[in-house]
Image (cartoon, rainbow, N blue to C red):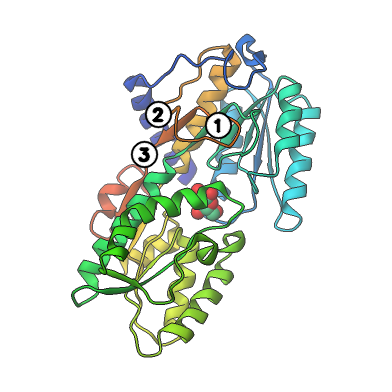
């Protein structure tokens, strides 16, 4: 039920995007340099989808939506997840097998965007188009397109939500004591989220509004290996012990919901007040927590819309048409600026949740159950 409703939403919104006429002159004869996608391919071709380990709900949902959506569009779907162990090598093998197996397009949610050069270059050499999904693939010119929510904007929204939450809930005037968390260093998104947030937060650190009591403000210090909640919880535990004996922690920048809940658990287990904590992904448990007044914010990045856009790209490649992109300068992967289609993320707090999830029936139902 959830899936069908999400897909219906996706169709409506995807239609709206189509009407805005977001398109570019970039066709199959530019980008990868292979030029093969300009010729199109069979309407029932196999499309490979290589997804990373399931570090958040969005990845779980994406697999099902790709399987159903590609098959509804007439393609054969080969959807694979990288397992939790030996993840990078397994994903490399899966992509290589998709190339050998004759996939015409491979959509990749990279486990480690820096370690797929050999595989995507093999794809390019075989005339297979490569679409980076959600996470950029780096250091190769063999990635044709990127489809994602606007990651820098996600970070900016998180930074602003932290400031708004502090003003609303800290119960005192500035300065506010805060700590910063970022995602896994092997995910290209992590730095983009963090840099977006710091664009908003750094001036407030500089002018003394925010005080990072641990002193840990470098991304190397804030990183959460593997996006694993236990790593975030351990780091929060140790910061609370070392820096918050007598100080109160007012707020935490968390890059996603899984880590937000781990940070909240850490504060609760230490017997401290729950700080203002940001998030991302609109995971069910975090939406409930927001409605209960615990987690402060999340981001709505509707996976159905992102999958829909990726499948639309596949359809355009299949017909040899121009592929819609709306950003041609933000995503330099070290070897080329990858033409991208970016969707707009939406900040969600308790206050605007009903409005933010108006088109996501499963989450709207949760919100309404608290009203
Ligand atoms: C995604 C986030 C997600 C994180 C961990 C990122 O690449 O953009 O939505 O929370 O991976 O799975």
Q: Which mark lies nearer to you, 3 or 2?
A: 3
Q: Is residue 153 left or right of residue 265?
A: left
Q: Is residue 60 left or right of residue 241?
A: right
| N-terminal-most mark, 2 or 1 | 2
Residue 293 visible within the image: no
Q: Position of residue 162 (x, y in %)?
A: 31, 62
Residue 62 visible within the image: yes
Q: Is residue 113 left or right of residue 25?
A: right
Q: Is residue 230 above or below residue 79?
A: below
Q: Is residue 51 left or right of residue 170?
A: right
Which image quarter holds the C terminus? bottom left
Q: Which mark lies nearer to you, 1 or 3?
A: 3
Q: Which mark is residue 171?
A: none
Give the quarter of the image for residue 158.
Answer: bottom left
Mark 1 lies on a secondary structure that is helix
Q: Which mark is residue 69?
A: 1
Q: Position of residue 279 (x, y in %)?
A: 41, 59
Separation of residues labelled 1 and 3 (CA atoms): 21 Å
Q: Are marks 3 and 2 in contact (CB under 8 Å)?
A: no
| N-terminal-most mark, 3 or 2 | 2
The one of 196 and 151 positioned closer to us in this rendering: 196
User: Where does label 2 land, which residue?
Assistant: 14
Q: What residue is rendered at 44% in x and 59% in y?
A: 284
Give the quarter of the image for residue 254.
Answer: bottom left
Q: Is residue 351 above or below residue 42?
A: below
Q: Residue at the bottom extreme? A: 246
- Circle 1 Cα neighbour tier, 10 Å, few/some/many (<14 / 14–19 / ≥20): many
Q: What residue is rendered at 46% in x and 64% in y?
A: 181
Q: What residue is rendered at 55% in x and 20% in y?
A: 315
User: Where does label 3 land, which residue?
Assistant: 344
């Amino acid at each position: 039920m959830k899936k069908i409703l999400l897909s219906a939403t996706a169709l409506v919104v995807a239609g709206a995007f189509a009407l805005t006429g977001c398109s570019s002159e970039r066709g199959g004869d530019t980008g990868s340099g292979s030029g093969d996608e300009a010729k199109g391919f069979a309407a029932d071709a196999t499309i490979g989808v290589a997804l990373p380990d399931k570090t958040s709900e969005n990845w779980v949902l994406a697999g099902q939506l790709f399987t159903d959506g590609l098959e509804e569009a007439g393609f054969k779907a080969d959807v694979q997840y990288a397992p939790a162990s030996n993840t990078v090598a397994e994903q490399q093998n899966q992509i290589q097998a998709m190339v050998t197996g004759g996939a015409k397009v491979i959509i990749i949610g990279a486990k480690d965007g820096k370690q797929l050069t050999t595989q995507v270059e093999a794809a390019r050499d075989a005339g297979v188009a490569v679409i980076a999904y959600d996470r950029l693939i780096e250091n190769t010119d063999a990635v044709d397109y990127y489809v994602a929510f606007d990651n820098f904007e996600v970070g900016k929204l998180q930074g602003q939500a932290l400031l708004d939450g502090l003003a609303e809930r800290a119960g005192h005037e500035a300065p506010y004591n805060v700590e910063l968390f970022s995602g896994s260093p092997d995910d290209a998104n992590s730095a983009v989220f963090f840099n977006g947030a710091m664009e908003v937060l750094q001036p407030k650190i500089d002018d003394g509004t925010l005080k990072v009591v641990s002193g840990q403000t470098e991304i190397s210090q804030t990183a959460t290996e593997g996006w694993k909640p236990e790593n975030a919880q351990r780091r929060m535990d140790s910061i609370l012990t070392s820096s918050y004996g007598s100080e109160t922690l007012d707020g935490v920048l968390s890059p996603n919901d899984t880590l937000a809940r781990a940070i909240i658990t850490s504060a609760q287990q230490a017997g401290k007040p729950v700080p203002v904590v940001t998030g991302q992904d609109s995971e069910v448990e975090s939406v409930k927590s927001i409605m209960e007044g615990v987690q402060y914010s999340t981001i709505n990045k509707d996976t159905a819309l992102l999958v829909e856009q990726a499948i639309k790209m596949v359809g355009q490649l299949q017909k040899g048409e121009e592929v819609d992109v709306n950003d041609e300068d933000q995503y330099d992967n070290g070897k080329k600026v990858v033409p991208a289609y970016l969707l707009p993320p939406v900040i969600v707090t308790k206050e605007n949740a009903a409005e933010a999830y108006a088109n996501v029936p499963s989450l709207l139902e949760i919100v309404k159950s608290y009203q």
